[in-house]
Amino acid sequence: MAAGGKIPSKEAGVLRGHEGAVLAVRFNTDGNYCLSCGKDRSLRLWNPYKALPIKSYSGHAREVRDVAVSKDNAKLSSCGGDRQLFYWDVATGRIIRKFRGHDSEVNSVKFNEYGAAIVSGGYDKSVRAWDCRSQSIEPIQKIDSFADSVTSVVLTSTEIIAGSVDGTIRTFDIRMGREVVDTLGQSVTCISMSNDGNCLLAGCLDSNLRLLDRSTGDLLQEYKGHMNKSYKMDSCLTNDDSHVVSGSEDGRVFFWDLVDPSLISSFKAHTSVITGLAYHPKEDCMLTSSVDGTIRLWKS
Amino acid sequence: MDDEGGQYIYYGQPLEREEDLSRKKAKLAVDQGQARRLPPWKQEVTDAEGRRRFHGAFTGGFSAGYYNTVGSKEGWAPKAFSSSRTQRAQTAQQSVDDFLDEDELEEARLKSVGTSSDYDTFGFTAAEIARRNAAKEAEKRPSAIPGPVPDEIVVPATQSIGVKLLMKMGWRRGRVVGPRLLTAVAAARREGRKAAMALASSSQVEEQEKKVYGAQLPPSFATSTLPSAEEEAEEEIDVTENIPEFVLHPKNDVYGLGFDPLKNAPEFKDLKNARKTKDTKIWMPGRMKDSRDASGKARNIGSQFGVGDMDYFHDDDEEIYDTVAGDIEERDEDAMKVERPKPRLLNTEDCIPGFIPATSSLTQLKPNRIPHPKVPPDFDTRVTFATALDVERRFSISEPPEAEPPSDPEMTKLIDGFATFVARIGPRFEELSKEKHAGNPQFSFLVDGPGHEYYRRKLWEEQRNIAEKGNEPIEPKRKGQNEKLDAGQRAVILGEAPLPRQEKARLHEKTTVIDTSKAKLFFKDNPQKQERFEVYIKEKLVGGIKRRPEGISISRAQYELEMREFEDAFRSLETAGPKTVLPEQPKEVSELTAMMTSRFTSGTVETISLAPFSESGSSSKELTLTGEYPRREENPWRPSAMLCKRFNLIDPFAGKPVTVTKPKTQTDSFILGIISAEEGAKKETPQATVSASLSLPGTSSTIKDTLQAVEEELKPVKTITEKPVDLYKAIFSDEEDEDEDIEGGKETSVELHEHGGKEVTAKQSEAAQAALNRLAAGDFLESLGKELGLTVPVEKPRVELNLYKGPSRPANSGVVEKSVASKVSSEPDQEKSNVESKKTGLDPPARADGQEKVSRWAPMDNDLVQNRSTESAHLGGGPANSDVGEALGKNLEGEPGSQKKVFGPSKDHRSSSSSDEDSESEPEERRRRHSKKSREDSDSESHKRRSRRHSKRSGHASDNSGDYDHSKSRRRSKSSRRGKDDKESRRHHKRRHEKHKRKEDDGDGRKKSRLQ
């Protein structure tokens, strides 16, 4: 399990199979498998430790930009350039539902805690929630208070948090019925929550990661050094919240200390832009995906 | 009518005997209920003894009122309100009459005063006589209407006797009644006029005088007045009818009808009329001249001009006519000269009698009376506010010379202080002080004492200082007047409220300041309240929905009041905050205050307090971008009810009206409208393995189940797409159903696999079937290979398939199943050896193409197995990272067992017993069906998709079929199970528990058997 914040910097495997850029990589809930999606319009299920492709899910008409796994690992949800969300059954690889409604490309998708709803954010400046339980393919909630493309969506049990290119992170508290807008002033490409749920890491297009206090909206820390100026690029906190990880457009991976924003480590991981980054939920293990078409597994 | 006895003849109806009556009625009276039931007109009112009540012969008899009720036919029931679309209810305008009955109405009518034709003696009687005459006449002459004509129809025209009399006397309609009153005055006038006529030809001048002398009347009467004119007209011109007023005096003014502004001033009226005629004359000068030329001094002008406008004015006043005519002549000439008309008032002719024309007009007097103020030549109409420049100039102009401070330091201090005061408050203060301290030697510096020089200098300095302070922030403004203001600055200048976003952001910065310093000062006397206020502020700054806190000792109304109070207090804090406490006061504000101070030079206390902050304005420049962000802002947001439901939260807006959005499109259903008949038939085929895996996620959240499902899925890949029934069941049915479905699905799937195992007994006749299956499998693999970017040989070596797939793919193809079955049944050891071999040379790429494909899949099994081993501790396998071969081996060697283990305990028992006859025969049939189906399905991808869609669409039908299958299988399994564990409960969790237990048992058993 979490081994005291050792940095996964040793390459432990390469997953090849995607034709063209891999746009996102995600661990499943327990971290034993991973999912990737890319420009080849397919989703792939891998066993990253064995570098084994398990299944390929194809159905998207355009590139697949994001994929999410339900908590019970039974369902997948993917979204992409074809403006729709696919709700997959993991086992059969069948599309259970296609949610159409976004007016433009869909950038990010997440399952809620119970796998009962999917929340997506797209280039159409909206966040939409979709119902997995009923047969309806209409969104059950449409939030369009954003001024620009929504790049990243994070869900808690009671909130929908979404980052947008308009430089805001909006937290929609369903329980309280209010919207909290944190304006960062810089386009947000990726938001991720700390594992304790208190902080929010926002990757901004000014090559800056910002750590926000969720309760107050204060800027706690900034992490610089990497390069992120034009791509939607993942960043996250390690599973023990000790470090901040981010990819870079030069193919490097950067590690910062959470508290003291010093660069701890950076190494060349890919030959091209790192698009996706996933940290194992328990172990010191990390996956990176890149435009070069590979997914790499990193271990400490 | 003859009676029987023939003695009496009865007329009419005999009265009933009182006794009979009373008895009858008494009975009725007793039977109250019955009486009540009858309608009112059938009820009979009885007295206490049951006798019919008699009201009196002339007041109703036995049924007074309306059948002995006080009501009417309509009764007393209130009018029912009814209004329909076609017949709208009239707005009932009630009057007193509505509440009066007939008698009262009669009374009311009698009391009221009005006219009655009865008393119109002439009219009524005349009408009566006329009517009678008409009736008589009508009788005489034949009529179109036979019989007497009803009076109402024919009403002869009648005239009252008065009219008749008058007419007999010669009066005609439209004429004035009464003798023509030719007063002596009029007669005299006429005489006078006649006399004047004789002299008329003499001269114009004489005429005027003649008028005066001839008639002994005041001049006003001499000029023709209207009544006299009329009389004349009637007398001389034979006017047969009274000319209506509106013809004579057409209304051409804008006064109200009948209003005459000159009613009480006949003189003015005359004047007006005269003017009017003059005006009209101007219009037709030529004609008048002609007429005059033609007839000379014709006496009767009226006849010449006809009955017109002119007649009644001047028909008898020739002199006037002549005057006017002469005037016209003059006018004509004047018109030719185009002379400007003289001012009317100055025209002596127009002068009102009794007045003398003024020699000088009023307008000429006016300028003398009120002379215009003289505008100084250097007056500037534009107002310019003192800008900083002006302020500067103002002080630089009158710079007093430098002066030494007085020797007395006290004095110096005093002068300094006083100068500062005066500079800020204004010269008025100085003046007041001068008065106040006139005799005070201490303040002698004000006048001319020692230190006066110094005071002047000091005052000037102070004034300049203040001016400069105000000047300072304006300086850049003046410089950059061409520069554009940003929205914020503009808003501040215009006094607009800042946008909520900015406000919120600023508010957040202010938090601590407000909290600590100022908030404490409010409600000092009431600590509890103070506490609440602080809480309120905190909440306010944090944001969110305010709820009334628990445990508050005040009532709701009080709380509301207090909230309002807090709101005000907070607002005051908000406004006071930045001014007094916040160092980072926005620059705009300071600029504004500076502008204000410079504009309103007279100082007040406020300017003093504001002045220092203009300096701090520069600090706002330090407010960098990083300081502004991140900003936080809160807005209300309404989540949809469904979202709340799916997030398992209570809708915060529940109960408030929701706008429901209807689904716009149902494109899916349109696409799915294409259903093939075979697919419909296919639905009825029994449920296969998919169902188990698909139904799992709904109920179990453990990955194990899912992975089992995955494993299950991946083995019989082909069957996946064709059996969507349970998938949808799993998704759309509720938990209870799902549980059952899982069971059913599992059982069926297990059965299938069992068949795989029991395939040993397959007959030769199945060979053809198997070949077909193989073909189908080949097709499938090929397509799969394409998908994965690999080449797949059409025919695969059996052995390899056996090797890699093992019995784990029994449902996939007949060939495989068959071979696997034989393998499994005959030689488990061989499998083990296969495993060993694989262990040694596992690397997939090293294998042949066909193998590679398999190997691609095989590891997946490994994976799953491995995962399972990690997940389910009871398996007792290696660690999570145990090598593939081992995992695979485990998988392969324990294939039949593991299958059972995975798919249900009941199967275990059954397979172990393997004595169930009907479960043997059934599966065969099922297998056949299944393979057939799979063949069909593997035809094309689109086909699959269609079937899937179809099943999705026709969820119900497929559900039903699925249900049918499940129930069947359930029944079967139940019956088979009954012997073993009849106490097994239907509850899912219990079964699951058992399953686990059995798994363990089974695993142990298998291990043992392996060891053996």
Image (cartoon, coloured by chain):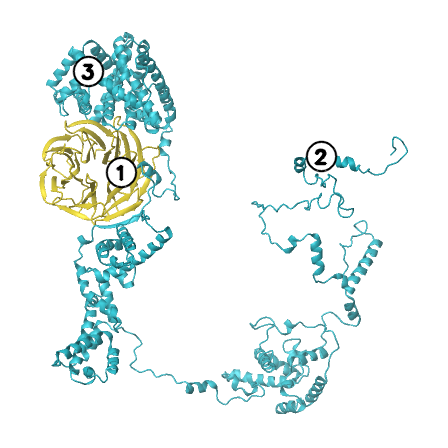
Chain colours: A yellow, B cyan
Please state which of residues B658 and B459 is positioned toward the viewer in this rendering: B459
Q: Residue at x 52, y 82 (%)?
A: B335
Q: Position of residue B71 (x, y in %)?
A: 68, 46
Please state which of residues A42 and A91 is positioned toward the viewer in this rendering: A91
Task: Output the chain of dot 1.
Answer: A
Q: At label 2, which amino acid type do we have?
A: Lys
Mark 1 vs mark 2, CA separation in Å: 82 Å
- Secondary structure state at the residue bearing disc 1: loop
Marking on residue B27: 2
Residue that mark 3 sits on: B1004
Location of residue B598 (image quadrant)? bottom left
Residues behind callouts 3 and 1 on a single chain: no
Residue that mark 1 sits on: A157
* B968 lies left or right of B772: right
Q: Residue at x 25, y 78 (%)?
A: B429
Task: Please state which of the two labelled residues, at mark 3 or mark 2, is closer to the viewer.
Answer: 2
| Looking at the image, residue B197 lies above or below residue B911 | below
Location of residue B579 (image quadrant)? bottom left
